[in-house]
Amino acid sequence: MVKPVDTPMMVQYHEIKSQYPDAFVFYRLGDFYELFEEDAVLGAKLLELTLTARNKNSENPVPMAGIPHHAAKNYIDILVDQGYKVAIVEQMEDPAVAKGMVKRDVVQLITPGTKMYDGAGSDKQNNYLAAILPNSDSWALAYIDLSTGELKATTIRRLTDILDELSSLEVKEVVLRQNDDLTTQQQLATQLGERGLVISTQLAIEPNATVSFLTQPLLKIDETKATAMLLNYIFDTQRRNLDHIVPAISYERLAYLKFNQDTRTNLDLVENNRTKKRAGSLLGLIDGTHTAMGSRLLKQWVLKPLRDQNDIEDRLDLVDAFRDDFFTRGALQDQLKSVYDLERLAARAAMGTMNARELVQLKRSLLAIPSIKAALAQTTSILKNASDTLDDMVDVAGLIEEAIVDDPPISVREGDIINDGFDDKIDNYRRVLQDNQTWLAQLETDERAATGIHSLKVGYNKNFGYFIEVTKANISKLEENRYERRQTLTNAERFVTPELKAHERLIIEAQAKRTQREYELFVTVRERVKANISRVQNLAQQIARLDVLSTLADVADNHRFVRPEFTTHNRVCVKQGRHPVVESLLEAGEFVANDVLLDENTTMQLITGPNMAGKSTYMRELALIVILAQMGSFVPADAAELPIFDQIFTRIGANDDMAMGQSTFMVEMAEANHALQEATAHSLILFDELGRGTATYDGMALAQAIIEFLDAHVHAKTLFSTHYHELTVLADQHDSIENVHVGAVEDESGQLHFLHQIKKGPADKSYGIHVAALAGLPETLITQAKVILTELEAQKSSIVTHDQPEERQLEQTRDQLSEQVALFNVDTINPEIKTLLDTLDNFDILTMTPVDAMNALNTLKKLRN
């Protein structure tokens, strides 16, 4: 079959599409953006559009779907939020004067990393785009938030740390160098793609003047190259002014308390792990900020606590000052309610997308600054210094106040933006328009009197202009040829006169000139704001910091937090520590506070006690106290003495990773290995029920070996909760390990009551069967479980100790393994259960994949049915 010849328009479309093969091309035709071919088919499905065809009567119709240009943003957002890219193609010349095919070109490529978020709740989120540049022994990472201009770079030694940093930043798109080794790039792209990241490529281009200026602060060559690659990608895709981007800042990850995505998830730092919402997370509890940039900054502090004690103390000093000065804090926060998102307003001004309403938002924000300065200046504390450094930008605020009306329209091209008295020409045009309106009213009065038609009216129609309208019932009253007929309606006729057409020209000309003049003056005002972008951005940073510090003072007041003290003696001493999120969900006084004491000679607590008694809460609360303290916040306790930690590691909860083919136990061991390999004596480790994902003796052996490895080689402060009561004897063999347990008591009826109180020494038993009874398991099952437990306890299994000869240790291990008691007496159970057990014996659990395990479970279920 002969391929049909493309029309000139489709030739143009294919040329553009070939440059953006991985993007939806929104091709402008009149008042619509059109999608063609594969874009139309997929776009119609994703956007719920009607799929039509171009040249539908031909042998090869072209699939086509259209979107009104005024509604394009909503459709673009839908595609970008799903990980797609959208290339916007506009007409580059007026079709009325174009010769031949109208010239079109891509004016912007919108991607997940370059989208300017402005939906509900998005003001509290950064949208980072990152670039990665591999080297022989390290990786350079650069990232930017296009909506605020924030630009940073760092060098990271390992790919796993790069991936974790991307997770922490919630990056959605990563730029790779196009001419890198294809194998290396493909492997990297695969790993990034598995994590849901959009991959883009960029040629390595020599820095231009703008790029050189923005990368000048960077001292490492690879960071400079990665940042230059990122900036060139931004300039190539956005094709507009980006003067709001600030010079790059290099940072070291070692300057911050380090923890990975598992820890962020396990501790519910920025979202609740179960609901995926802010509510129920640490950030959700403490974020009472009054500005969008303050909320974003607080999240950054939560995810990147500090390690430099002087920097931490500086923040704590300011929180302390705000807490002590309630009235200054209140006055500040009252004014902060009037401050809009200065960072993003500055970005919109730079990119030329700021409208008149946003100029008014900037003005109102700036008008609040003098009151903030005055409130801070009246203090006698260190807060007074903050007042001296704030730039109230009265010149910019005054300009906007003088030029722009208080309630302007959204459109900047329809007039009614500029204040009366700001510009003589606009005032003259307005007088002409007002005079003509008066003239039109007088014309209507005169014509009614001349014709005797009291219902005659002078009106205006967008399509036909000004007219004189007479109902058909009164047409006979008009003298012949008095008016020139313009339009016939069902019940009326519309007419014009030479005099009316002359005034129409005057009015339209005055309106057009006034509207154009107002737009020009608006752009002039916006350009003057743009010239002060750096001042706006500096002010935004200062306001955000004041917002966060005053908010942390609120949190300290409202939740009874105290200022932590830092020690160089590697001593943890928390008096009546509390889990702030759990406490906030309970009635006042219900939460049971606990002390945490790990002195210089104690590195580990072995925590025993029943499920649901509070072991995990106790462990998590210490980690949250450490994070709050090192981010510069007060902490939920009566007193807290802490060292400066370098890292936090957690292994909490039973999670598998089906997508990566990892079982619960494999994930558990991988997370444990991460801590064992990376932790130092200055780290904090939380291990919850390590070893429970495999057979009893395997799990116990691994748990013991891990405990002893930590004690011998790592020396990190560790909280290790376990149900293996046999492990508690390790505290007798290692001076740096101590036993604690969560208290629980049985009443006279055998009911179990949790005390949620941490006490010295090991738990006397696990209370697992009691918890099962609380869960509602059948009474006959509970009774049988107690019988089996008695038999198992009679075996007196114990752990391997190291004060015996090696031969005796091995012999004891073999004896213990040979003495495992069957959970069921097979000779006395019914045939159905016996069949189930025989089938279970045939499963090779150690070689099963997660899918095999699910199939095996289904087989057992069918046997039961």
Image: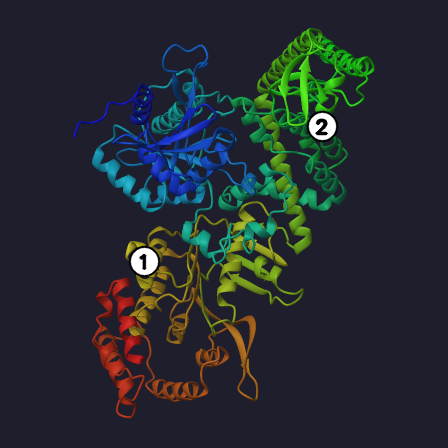
Q: Residue furthest left?
A: 1
Q: Is residue 492 above or below residue 271?
A: above
Q: Is residue 469 left or right of residue 792?
A: right
Q: Which residue is mark 1?
A: 658
Please report the residue visible at 42 percent of the width from the left and 15 percent of the height from the top.
Answer: 209
Horizontal and vertical percent position of residue 205: 32, 21
Q: Tell me the crowding category of disc 1: few under 14, some 14 to 19, or many 20 or more residues within 10 angstroms, Cα based.
A: few
Horizontal and vertical percent position of residue 531: 58, 17
Element marked by disc 1: helix
Q: Is residue 248 above or below residue 294?
A: above
Horizontal and vertical percent position of residue 855: 27, 68
* Disc on res. 367: 2
Please report the residue visible at 65 percent of the width from the left and 41 percent of the height from the top.
Answer: 290
The residues tagged by marks 2 and 1 sit, at their Cα atoms, a distance apart of 55 Å
Identify which amino acid the numbered label 1 is placed on. Met
Instruction: State the image quarter where residue 435 is shown.
Output: top right
Q: Tell me the crowding category of disc 2: few under 14, some 14 to 19, or many 20 or more residues within 10 angstroms, Cα based.
A: many
In this view, the mark in front (2 or 1):
1
Instruction: State the image quarter where residue 676 is shown.
Output: bottom left
Looking at the image, which is closer to me, 756 or 88? Answer: 88
Please report the residue visible at 73 percent of the width from the left and 39 percent of the height from the top.
Answer: 334
First in residue order: circle 2 vs circle 1 = 2
Q: Say how the picture is coloured.
A: rainbow
Horizontal and vertical percent position of residue 828: 29, 93
